[in-house]
Amino acid sequence: MPFGLLLGPLIGAAGCEWLFAEKTMKPATVSGVGSVIGTVAGLGMKIVVALLMVVVFAIDLFWL
């Protein structure tokens, strides 16, 4: 798994919250972790939908 997929949202959200919203490091880190959780959850849902599409296609292809 590419580490940039996880580190990008974490560093980007935490850094922007810390620099521009002028928050302390703890709330900024919580924001970064939340963005990573959202990214991983979205990735998981995309995998589930892709597998369901493959299953539906296989059923349609082989069902006589």
Image (cartoon, rainbow, N blue to C red):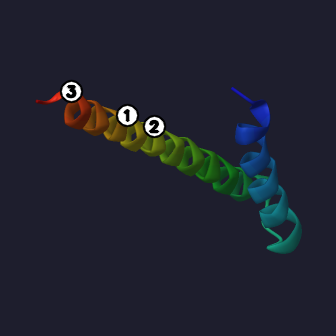
Q: Earlier in the sequence, mark 3 or mark 2?
A: 2
Q: Residue at x 73, y 50 (%)?
A: 9
Q: Nearer the viewer, mark 2 or mark 1?
A: 1
**Drawn side of residue 51 relative to residue 58, left or right:** right
| Residue 49, placed above or below residue 17 | above
| Residue 55, placed above or below residue 23 | above
Q: Say which quadrant the C terminus sits in.
A: top left
| Residue 40 image position (x, y, % from top left) | 55, 41
To which quarter of the image does residue 22 belong? bottom right
Q: Which residue is mark 3?
A: 62
Q: Mark 2: which secondary structure?
A: helix
| Residue 31 image position (x, y, % from top left) | 66, 57
Q: 10 Å neighbourhood of mark 2: few (<14), some, or many (≥20)? A: few
Q: Which residue is mark 2?
A: 47
Q: Mark 1: which secondary structure?
A: helix
Q: 10 Å neighbourhood of mark 1: few (<14), some, or many (≥20)? A: few
| Residue 52 image position (x, y, % from top left) | 31, 38
